[in-house]
Amino acid sequence: LNAFFFCVSYLFYSHGLVELLALTSCWPLPQAAVYDWDSNTQGWILSSFFYGYIITQIPGGYLAGRLGPKWLMGFGILGTVVFTLLTPVAADLGAAYLIVLRALEGVGEGVTFPAMYAMWAAWAPPLERSRLLTITYIGAQMGTVVCLPLSAEICFYLGWPYVFYISGAVGLLWFVLWSALVFNSPDTHPRISEQERLYITNSLKNELSPTAKQIPWCSIVKSVPLWAIVVAHSSYNWTFYTLLTLLPTYMNVILGFSIQKNGILSALPYMGCAVTAVLSGQVVDYLRESCLYRTVVVRKCATLMGMIGPAVFLVATGYTGCNYIMAIAFLTISSSLGGISASGFNINHLDIAPSYAGILLGITNTFATIPGMVGPVIARDLTKNVRERERERHTHTHTHTHTHTQ
């Protein structure tokens, strides 16, 4: 269900990417209204989600520790479902209303990721964290993989409003399953076997602090490892969110694909990322458990591989011109290599302070959300008056000057 949660979360964000092209004059479709929004307005619509998302990160981590993560995640997604269903109405009212609505969606989703880390802190044995969390993260990639082509087909045959109605229905299904099947910890789960409960609790007895309710804010702020995670998380997200936000536009404007082909081809990089993320989780935990490599060593190696490899291939994409085969291949390789970092900095929060993992994720994700707010807007401004042949090169090179600093 955690993987399904990630799938639903990214479904709510990424459905706006293909639909924005259907909403505007890029792909006029007879099934629904088309809006004449310029590229600057489109950039604000895409990034507005993050303006709500950023303000509930740290509160989400704090409330997960106080109230428990189950219902915080559940009602966070439920709120996003409601706003998603209202999207067609907001679009008819005007771009400003849609921007506000997407910001409210972000408010609902902002609490969910810190709460999810607080959940895993109580459930994931230390030597299985990489395996479990990377399997969870596959949901994020699969949400994008499913959403991009499926949204394109729905837009083409039914009209873009149905994408939001169907997404809302999927979110409601997740909420029902989550409410019935998930519990905050092994000790509160009525159906878990005693053997499994003891295995999990014994593996975590030296990890979780009995005084976790008293949050050491000063120690957290002064933590050098935490700020290292902030740098890695922010750098990775600049690449991830810029690519996630602008890839459908790149496929349409630069490579000239139709809405249906766009959705399918835009999903390929995320499919590759999902595969490498799961494989890297298996390898990393094997190295920690069987080969006795130190956790800090394998986390650093996974992070570096997941940063440098994507940087090389994404910058190279900018020099492929209109060679769509090479461009798609480079984008897929870049995103696939980025999946390795799922076993790196993404799990460090649970390594350095599992009792406060939700708060730590809230802090790092606050900084890492800034690229989602400004990256698409800056990228669109950089390419506004550039010749089409050079347009993609500027976007990809700008994106990865940040990643190269790692």
Image: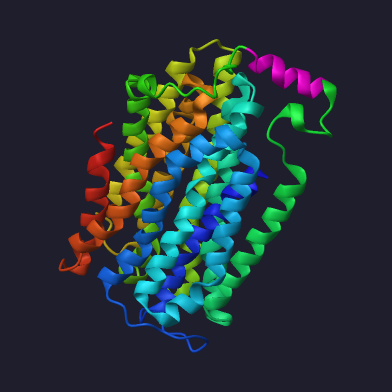
In the rendered image, residue 343, in percent from the top left (x then y), is placed at 50, 30
Residue lying furthest bottom in this view?
A: 30
Magenta part, dominant SS: helix
Say whether residue 325 is visible: no
- Residue 30 part of the magenta-drawn span: no
Start-end of magenta stretch: 195-205
In the rendered image, residue 393, in percent from the top left (x then y), is placed at 23, 56
Placement of the N terminus among the 4 image quadrants: top right
Position above or below: 325 against 6: below
Say whether residue 53 is visible: yes
Placement of the C terminus among the 4 image quadrants: top left
Q: Nearer the viewer, residue 67 or 35?
A: 67
Position above or below: 186 against 52: above
* Apparent side of residue 75 relative to residue 391 in the rendered image (left or right): right
Q: Which residue lies at the image location 37% right of the left edge and 63% below the top edge?
A: 46
Q: Which residue lies at the image location 68% right of the left edge and 54% below the top edge?
A: 175
In the rendered image, residue 25, in percent from the top left (x then y), is placed at 36, 82
Q: How is the image coloured?
A: rainbow
Q: Nearer the viewer, residue 218 or 156?
A: 218
Q: Which residue lies at the image location 58% right of the left edge and 81% below the top edge?
A: 158
Corner quadrant of residue 47: bottom left
Q: Nearer the viewer, residue 280 or 356?
A: 356
